[in-house]
Amino acid sequence: MKAEDKIPRHFFLNMGKLESIHDELRDKFIEVTGMFEEYADKCLRENNWDWAQSLNAFNFLNSEGQIPPQCFYRHEGQTIFPSNKNMMVFEFASMTNMCPQWAEKCLSDMKWSWQDAEAIFKKMKIENQIPEDFFYSTNGDYDLDGPNAAADFIKKFSIRSGLTEDWARKILEDAQWNYNQARRDFAYMKDIPEDAFIP
């Protein structure tokens, strides 16, 4: 009998669920802290994937100035490294539902300060100063389980990222159709050709 035969099948199922939970925690921690994935992952692992404990540790170390700026792609709304603007645009577009080009313009106008861009977006949204065509269409849900699942998935990623559908497909295929992995791969890609984006 092989060693793995002695391990109950539900162990592997539970491991898969655990990895999925860790992925969600990691993505949320990146969003909240503005840290790169590897540092967000490190903080969560060192705190046994306990959200409150990880956040408390982060807040303490950050307030003491013990976290180097290079650990962040977005830090206190100010620090932004050019190679990670893709991530900021993608996350801002996801948060606001704006098309990527308008999300990028909002961030650029605010000198890549996340806090300032978010504040001006909320103010203009409340005052109805943002044209409807600045937002991507939300008419109908994407059917990610139906016969056209792949096409819908590609369309969703294309709209979110601003990439052409050919490039969206390529990144999704390279990530084995894992949306979160594709998002991270896109965020850290360098030297993306101009014709990769929707005109």
Image: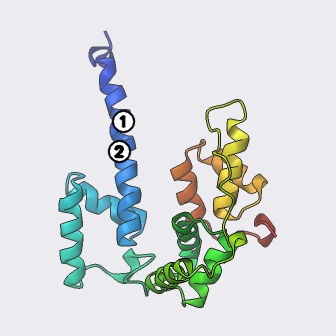
Taking the image as shown, residue 70 lies to the left or right of residue 133, namely: left
Taking the image as shown, residue 40 lies to the left or right of residue 47, namely: right
Separation (CA) of disc 1 from disc 2: 6 Å
Residue at screen point 36% across, 27% down: 13
According to the picture, the residue beneath numbered tag 1 turns out to be 17
Please state the horizontal and vertical placement of residue 26, each as a whole percent of the image. 37, 56
The residue carrying pointer 1 sits among few (fewer than 14), some (14 to 19) or many (20 or more) residues within 10 Å by Cα, namely few
* Residue 74 in sight from this viewpoint: yes
* Residue 191 in sight from this viewpoint: no
Query: Is 131 drawn above or below residue 160 in the view shown?
Result: below
Residue at screen point 34% across, 48% down: 22
Query: Is 95 drawn above or below residue 121 in the view shown?
Result: above
> What's the image's color scheme?
rainbow
Query: Is 18 drawn above or below residue 138 in the view shown?
Result: above
Q: Quadrant of residue 105?
A: bottom right
Query: Is 78 drawn above or below residue 166 in the view shown?
Result: below
Please state the horizontal and vertical placement of residue 170, each as a whole percent of the image. 71, 50
Which numbered circle lies on residue 165? Answer: none
Quick one: which residue is furthest to the front in this view?
127
According to the picture, the residue beneath numbered tag 2 turns out to be 21
| Disc 1 to disc 2: CB gap under 8 Å | yes
Q: Amino acid at mark 1?
A: Lys
Q: Nearer the viewer, residue 175 or 108?
A: 108
Q: Quadrant of the N terminus?
A: top left
Taking the image as shown, residue 117 lies to the left or right of residue 129, namely: left
- Secondary structure of the residue carrying tag 1 is helix
Quick one: which residue is furthest to the top in this view?
1
Please state the horizontal and vertical placement of residue 197, each as a whole percent of the image. 76, 67
